[in-house]
């Protein structure tokens, strides 16, 4: 399971070091795509295959399904860690997530989210204020 939060720096070639605690679960080859809330999603190949299967099982007759499939699948790119454990962030993804010099890797169960450090700090401050209310809603539907 991918958990934890780590800050790293993009180099001049748009490469960033993967946190060592994630390398075992992610493997050498991964899939990176546009994520939600302004971040990127990084999946191990096996987790990506499961996600893609779920998306393929949805009806393409629904406009929202088509749109979300296009958003997630067309924005995806296979990435591979180099011998130093770095991955290259494609230009279109770097632009989408507004990544500058410092990025945050956040482990979220089956994926890693990659955030611009300033965007992450703002987002995290907001959800920390709402954590009690979110937990209560999840408790109401039996998720907690």
Image (cartoon, grey):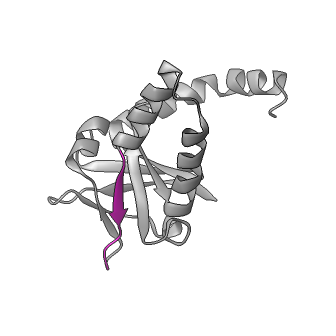
Question: Looking at the image, which is closer to me, 99 or 124?
Answer: 99
The quadrant where residue 37 appears: top left
Q: Residue furthest bottom?
A: 83
**Residue 95 lies in magenta, yes or no?**
no
Task: Specify whether residue 59 is in view.
Answer: yes
Q: Magenta part of the protein: which range?
A: 76-83
Q: Relative to 101, is 132 on the left or the right?
A: right
Question: What residue do we see at 23% from left, 42% from top?
Answer: 92
Q: Residue furthest front?
A: 61
Image quarter where the N terminus lies is: bottom right
The percent coordinates of residue 73 (x first, y second) are 41, 42
The quadrant where residue 82 appears: bottom left
Residue 4, compared with residue 138, is above or below; it is below
Question: Looking at the image, which is closer to me, 129 or 13?
Answer: 13
Q: Residue furthest left?
A: 12
Question: Looking at the image, which is closer to me, 33 or 116?
Answer: 33
């Amino acid at each position: 399971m991918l958990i934890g939060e780590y800050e790293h720096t993009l180099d001049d070639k748009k490469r960033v070091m993967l946190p060592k605690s994630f390398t075992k679960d992610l493997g050498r080859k991964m899939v990176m795509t546009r994520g939600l809330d302004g971040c990127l999603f990084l999946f191990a190949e096996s987790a990506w295959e499961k996600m893609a299967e779920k998306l393929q099982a949805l009806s393409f007759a629904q406009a929202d399904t088509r749109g979300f499939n296009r958003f997630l699948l067309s924005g995806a790119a296979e990435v591979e860690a180099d011998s130093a454990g770095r991955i290259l962030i494609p230009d279109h993804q770097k632009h989408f997530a507004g990544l500058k010099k410092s990025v945050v890797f956040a482990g979220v169960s089956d994926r890693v989210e990659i955030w611009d450090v300033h965007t992450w700090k703002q987002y995290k401050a907001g959800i920390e204020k709402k954590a009690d209310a979110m937990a209560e809603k999840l408790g109401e539907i039996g998720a907690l």
